[in-house]
Image (cartoon, grey):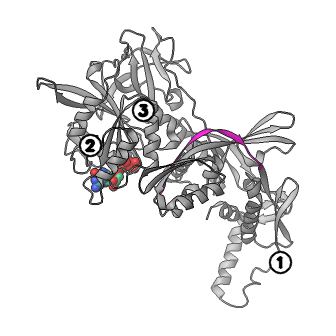
Amino acid sequence: TPSELLRNFCIIAHIDHGKSTLADRMLQLTGVVEQRAMRAQYLDRMDIERERGITIKSQAVRMPWAIPDADGVQIPHALNMIDTPGHVDFTYEVSRSLAACEGAVLLVDAAQGIEAQTLANLYLAMENDLEIIPVLNKIDLPAAQPEKYAEEIAGLVGGDPEDVLKVSGKTGEGVEALLDRIVERVPAPVGDAEAPARAMIFDSVYDTYRGVVTYVRVVDGQLNPREKIIMMSTRATHELLEIGVSSPEPQPTKGLGVGEVGYLITGVKDVRQSKVGDTVTNAQKPADDSLGGYQDPKPMVFSGLYPIDGSDYPVLRDALDKLKLNDAALNYEPETSVALGFGFRVGFLGLLHLEIVRERLEREFDLALISTAPNVVYNVTMEDRTEVEVTNPSEFPGGKIREVREPIVRSTVLAPSEFIGTIMELCQSRRGTLLGMDYLSEDRVEMRYTLPMAEIVFDFFDHLKSRTRGYASFDYERTGDQAADLVKVDILLQGEQVDAFSAIVHKDAAYAYGLMMVGKLKELIPRQQFEVPIQAAVGSRVIARETVRAIRKDVLAKCYGGDISRKRKLLEKQKEGKKRMKTIGRVEVPPNAFIAALSSD
Ligand code: GTP
């Protein structure tokens, strides 16, 4: 297809504003998916993925759409709809997908208005110089307020509220007009057809049958089947076994030219050989410069992952190896913990990434896991100026420390204005600094804060939601780091450090953390034949202490007479517990105690 007849666009939206439903309707209206074959969320196809255990998600779909020219002659165009991951954890991936487009449909739920991810994605689209097409969705809903939110959007992206399209992905109303608008407004791609080939990788997925499927957008030149190609960041060469477009089923083609979007198959088995953001060029006639912007995924949040049943360790290792084939950002190494046994220290792009990985491990590999509290990466400078990067609190250095730096984020909270006070209170308690506040409409505000990343990785979002009865939305981006007064709190059982419970916290929060952990452990650690002190300490200074008093062996002692079945249960429990007791120093601890202490409540 000549590039002047191509249109590359994506849909950006807050979660649940109806992106998948709208995409489905477009597939149907353009005729690429027949009415009969149509089912909800064709592009997601998770059911098939699960059934066959493969990933065939369509990252980019090509659809025909014709609009009349000045003389009323229908001119056929080809639209490439490129899927973008919606969440901040994947900001880099989002921005690469956006870089493959010239336009973006900014989709907003007509009953909800703009939310935090709407903004985050919009800003990324603007940074990539995309033509923005604002659209209100779900106008069929009785609660829709298209007029109000058209104002809100126009205020944000500029332009006339009248120009905001109003559609329903559900009923199909307005969707044809939207397709017309995409052809009219989104610029055709431009590139140099004679130059050496350069194509940007915006996604790559592992498929059990076909190996890695790499999605690219050709910028200059042309890629052809059977050619040798080079991945410019690694200089690795591969042969192009197949090249084609998804419509939405894969259709091999004779090549991809300027502005075209499609897939490549080279037979490699690991997505790390085909990295998002990298540039593909021709090995015979290579380009001098890559397209730029390539960046290795960098883990931001670390957590220890341990199988609850220690014999599952090999299963966990294999499972991580498998997931890694499809997740270039996943990063792990073996770790042992006195309290939890053998496991892995795993690095993630963010909290959502952590949750997805953990859920997949549990669901797809049938593992029961315990994870240690997530922590960010700290940079510690010692008095002698050596620097240490700390990804595990128990490895926080002990010597003379000059400075500790922690990552910070720039965050956006959107909420009804009645919640301003409570949001400020929450952000202040998390060491936040207010950067600014704007009213999106009379009753909705956007608040911008810088916050230490460590303060949001744990339960910030839960607190925000409960304080605002679910009405607030939240988004953040990493912006840099800052020095802070941070200390390591250790938890000791009879003088022995329990590694999994060490935490790096702000000095002002050390006491509260220590108190909470020793309190929890006191409830969870059974009495022993001797007294067990549980202490929280910063360095050698004890900041909190509890004691589990000694008892005689008789576990029934505390059940004065009473219920016989309860006594039997206790005895059984004790037997079961003995099998898998862990010992810290001389103290016997049921493994469940550590697990219970680590689960947040
Ligand atoms: P994620 O894929 O989870 O990010 O969500 P999404 O933005 O793709 O939204 P999705 O298409 O899954 O739609 C979210 C919910 O809104 C679903 O329950 C849809 O049925 C519903 N929905 C989507 N579009 C419309 C619409 O035009 N009208 C109405 N009434 N409901 C809609």
Instruction: Please give the count of numbered marks on the rendered protein.
Output: 3
**Residue 32: within the magenta?**
no
Q: Which mark is residue 551?
A: 1
Q: Residues within 10 Å of mark 1 (few under 14, many from 20)?
A: some
For residue 101, above or below residue 443:
above
Whole-Å distance between the Cαs marked 1 and 3?
65 Å
Q: Position of residue 345 (x, y in %)?
A: 66, 45
Whole-Å distance between the Cαs marked 3 and 2?
26 Å
The residue lying furthest to the bottom in this view is 561
Q: Earlier in the sequence, mark 3 or mark 2?
A: 3
Magenta segment: 472-486
Q: Residues within 10 Å of mark 3 (few under 14, many from 20)?
A: many
Q: Residues within 10 Å of mark 2 (few under 14, many from 20)?
A: few
Where is the N terminus found, in terms of image quarters? top left
Identify the residue under disc 3: 98
**Is 40 left, or right, of 326 in this rendering?**
left
The residue lying furthest to the left in this view is 72
For residue 89, above or below residue 525:
above
Q: Residue at x 22, y 34 (%)?
A: 180
Looking at the rendering, which quadrant does residue 239 occupy?
Answer: top left
Q: Which mark is residue 162?
A: 2
